[in-house]
Image (spheres, rainbow, N blue to C red):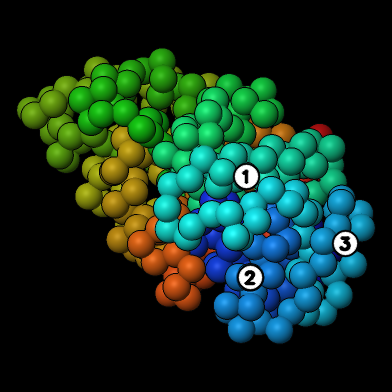
Amino acid sequence: MAHKPLIAISLGDPAGIGPEILVRTVADESVNQVARCIVYGDARVIEKAAWEAKLDWTVRAIRKPAEALFAPRSIEVIDLANADPTTFEPGKVQALCGKAAWEYIEAMVQAALRGEVDVINTAPINKEAIQAANVPHIGHTEMLAALTGTHDPLTMFETLGLRVFFLSRHVSLRQSCNLVTKARLLDYIERCHQAMEQLGLGGGELAVAGLNPHSGEHGLFGDEEVREVEPAVLEARKRGFRVVGPIGADSVFHQAKIGRYAAVLSLYHDQGHIATKTLDFERTISLTLGLPFLRTSVDHGTAFDIAWQSKASAISMIESILVAARYAPAYRRSAAR
């Protein structure tokens, strides 16, 4: 690869599995072939994680990305020195760790906004620890929105080429049905196409999933498709967007996986999550789009029950870096326009 993108990775919650999967990821040969990685974290935590992973790699503390040398068998760390491993207990909710995780993200985002890194990647954080630290934002998406001044960033999952957007996320199933409106669908169809352009997928067709079984069978069991989805799709097509639907949720994800559609707009959280995670749980990667930079992430949590026990798999984080490296050039070109 002529230009390896510079990918910043946050350590996540130091008490979770983030440190151990992170060190194995930055040491992975497939990652090093396509990306240059810098960690935002505490060098002492990284050193401990590398030692426990039996990685004979040097941890090099630096102050800014420009100081990175990317020497063989070395891990470059923007060292915030805020989580001494002797002061927290692995696998527990702790305010210290929530505060540290927030500070890694904050510093990393500022570097991305200054153009010092190409892509950001986030290790898992724990919402209870974040709350205990009195951080005003509960999750990664909310943090990124606040730090960049972005209204309602767009989430996309990618699993082995299947791409899924979400009309709604963390709301009740009943509320998600109420959010299936023509106006919201039109807004999301437009934003999904913009996101696809950013990823270099312009020209691809977006499929809108149905809400009810068999998309309601023309109103026989549920009329949301007739009242809201079909009018939204028709209006979007008039505006020049390549979009079809509603297409039954029992078939649309398979059709997208085999290449008929570039992406699917899922109408609620679990509809898309089940499709992607059943296909390959560990290789389901979350992308946050609509930001001034690209963000990728694993789609699993801190796994406190196995943290710091050398049991956690790094497959998802490795895949998230590979996905980031693949999309980085197109996203960078889009941001420059």
Q: Compare residues 191 and 225 and report the one nearer the observer.
A: 191
Q: Earlier in the sequence, mark 2 or mark 1?
A: 2
The dot on residue 100 is: 1
Label tally: 3
Closer to the eye: label 1 or 3: 1
Tell me which residue sits at (23%, 31%) in the image: 173
Relative to residue 80, is residue 16 drawn left or right? left
Dot 3 amino acid type:
Ala
Dot 1 amino acid type:
Ala
- Report whether residue 262 is seen: no
| Residue neighbourhood size for the residue with mark 2, other residues' Cα within 10 Å, grouped as few (<14), some (14–19), many (≥20) | some
Q: Compare residues 86 and 8 and report the one nearer the observer.
A: 86
Q: How far apart, in angstroms, are the residues tagged by discs 2 and 1?
A: 16 Å
Q: Earlier in the sequence, mark 1 or mark 3?
A: 3
Residues tagged 2 and 1 counted as in contact (Cβ below 8 A): no
Dot 2 amino acid type:
Lys
Q: Disc 1 on helix, strand or loop?
A: helix
For label 3, the residue is 68
Q: Earlier in the sequence, mark 3 or mark 2?
A: 2
